[in-house]
């Protein structure tokens, strides 16, 4: 059952400062003492510095080593690409995007946060920085007179604190004193088990000017979903970036974890980040997916066909870890192909019911562990390639698509290779990003291969 706050339908005044003068006023009005200067890395993790507000406005431009964009989720570095592209590990210049200034409501002292952009010292943007990758795709749309619109849906699990990674995760204890043992999809009672936590999430979100459309209980035990209102892709990626941090912090306040792993608990559904997408004409504001009679346009079908054609090659940006592919299994409420259908949740690409102005495509492939900047960029890039080439989609699937063949890579190494081999996506994202990103993914896989799993001990220890 959905949980919603009416006053969350408007952006809070605490978000939206666009200049250094407005940022100064924001900080002064709220007696801000510290500013968190953050930049999302390849994993969508916040990197940066915390500094006194006075130093932020009065000091030199902030810098960080270029290696922050080569770091794996385990904290390692793929030396083969680092030695080639950044052998001296020189500093990058980080410039604040003042439109992203917001409070940090869980901080002990009055604190603000600002998302930064990364540049080389000669002024060039760092093209393999995830936020820049998305901005590049948005700009390609705008050059054609189009504005892409997106609306993400983010699933996550609440789990008991887990201090030993050798032990499986478990659902947390709710207000009843009991943990969920079965699936409670759309249950209002299951949401109410954690009312205090969700109230805190809403409070934290409101303080940052983040918009929650609805909150529901998903199919898994302790699995929730937050839906965001549609809007500009960069703004929505920023919101997902901040929401993940917000939800984790709120959960910690209630002595539990919130995890965005794609498959955190065996035999439970995986967590997705579904992305709804449409494209409007900048001049007229009309949705280019519908004609004047309300029927789907050639552009709608070409966008859809672009997703069908190119999503498999972009898979490493949608499912970035070994764990991501545990979610994408047959009959698991997750897609295994790029089939499409009208209001069909078994396909990778769903066309939700809507009026003509709201016609859109829902990409159900991305997992919630994906970097939102890269998942949105990849989805829009595939659609754009279809628009530019005038591609035609397959016929829509009627009924279940679960019995169809796999269209998608089955693992991260296969997915990384597919991205490298795609001339279309490499040309769009740039050699620097593809080289950096795939090197990071391979390094993460090598780290994973150093771990011996319980399955190996269970079935191989005494049997081989």
Image: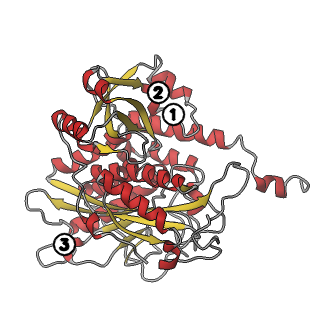
The label on residue 67 is 2
In 3D space, how far apart are the residues under numbered discs 2 and 1 (Cα atoms)?
Answer: 6 Å
2 and 1 marks in contact (CB < 8 Å)? yes
The N terminus: image quadrant: bottom left
In percent of width and height, residue 62 lies at 33, 24
In 3D space, how far apart are the residues under numbered discs 3 and 2 (Cα atoms)?
Answer: 44 Å
Mark 3 falls on what kind of element? helix
Mark 1 falls on what kind of element? loop
32, 331: nearer the viewer: 32
Q: How many marks?
A: 3
Identify whether 343 is placed above or below 115: below
Q: Is residue 314 visible?
A: no
Identify whether 421 is placed above or below 307: above
In percent of width and height, residue 147 lies at 19, 55
Which is nearer the N-term, disc 3 or disc 1? 1
Of all residues shown, which one is farthest toward the top? 88
Residue under the image location 57 percent in, 62 percent down? 327
Residue under the image location 49 percent in, 49 percent down? 316
232, 445: nearer the viewer: 232
In percent of width and height, residue 40 lies at 40, 40
248, 26: nearer the viewer: 26
Give the labeled residue for mark 3: 357
- Taking the image as shown, residue 231 lies to the left or right of residue 460, namely left
3 and 1 marks in contact (CB < 8 Å)? no
Give the labeled residue for mark 1: 71
């Amino acid at each position: 059952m959905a949980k919603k706050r009416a006053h969350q339908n408007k952006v809070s005044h605490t978000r939206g400062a666009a200049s250094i003068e407005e940022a100064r006023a924001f900080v002064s009005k709220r007696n801000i003492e510290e500013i968190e200067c953050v930049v999302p890395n390849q994993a969508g993790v916040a990197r940066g510095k915390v500094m006194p507000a006075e130093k932020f406005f009065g000091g030199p431009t902030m810098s960080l080593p270029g290696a922050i964009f080569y770091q794996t989720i385990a904290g390692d570095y793929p030396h083969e690409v680092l030695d080639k592209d950044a052998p001296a590990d020189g500093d990058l210049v980080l410039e604040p995007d003042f439109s992203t200034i917001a409070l940090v409501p869980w901080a002990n002292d009055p604190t603000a946060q600002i998302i930064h952009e990364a540049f080389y010292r000669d002024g060039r943007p760092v093209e393999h920085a995830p936020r820049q990758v998305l901005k590049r795709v948005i700009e390609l749309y705008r050059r054609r007179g189009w504005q892409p619109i997106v609306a993400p849906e983010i699933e996550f699990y609440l789990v008991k604190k887990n201090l030993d990674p050798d032990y499986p995760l478990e659902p947390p204890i709710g207000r009843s004193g009991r943990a969920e043992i079965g699936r409670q999809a759309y249950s209002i009672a299951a949401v109410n088990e954690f009312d205090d936590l969700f109230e805190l999430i809403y409070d934290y979100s409101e303080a940052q000017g983040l918009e929650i459309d609805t909150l529901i209980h998903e199919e898994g035990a302790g699995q929730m979903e937050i839906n965001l209102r549609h809007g500009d892709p960069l703004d929505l990626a920023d919101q997902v970036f901040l929401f993940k941090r917000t939800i984790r912090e709120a959960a910690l306040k209630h002595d539990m974890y919130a995890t965005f792993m794609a498959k955190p608990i065996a035999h439970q559904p995986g967590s997705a980040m579904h992305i709804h997408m449409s494209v409007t004409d900048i001049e007229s504001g009309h949705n280019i997916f519908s004609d004047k009679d309300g029927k789907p346009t050639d552009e709608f079908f070409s966008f859809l066909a672009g997703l069908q054609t190119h999503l498999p090659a972009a898979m490493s940006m949608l499912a970035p870890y070994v764990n991501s592919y545990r979610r994408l299994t047959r009959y698991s409420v997750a897609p295994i192909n790029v089939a499409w259908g009208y209001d069909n949740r078994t396909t990778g690409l769903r066309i939700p019911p809507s009026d003509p102005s709201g016609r859109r495509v829902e990409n159900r492939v991305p997992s919630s562990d994906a970097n939102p900047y890269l998942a949105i960029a990849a989805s829009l890039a595939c659609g754009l390639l279809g628009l530019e080439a005038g591609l035609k989609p397959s016929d829509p699937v009627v009924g279940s698509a679960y019995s169809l063949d796999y269209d998608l890579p089955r693992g991260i190494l296969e997915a990384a290779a597919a991205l490298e081999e795609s001339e279309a996506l490499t040309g769009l994202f740039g050699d620097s990003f593809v080289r950096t990103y795939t090197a990071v993914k391979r390094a993460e896989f090598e780290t994973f291969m150093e771990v011996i799993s319980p399955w190996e001990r269970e079935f191989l220890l005494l049997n081989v």
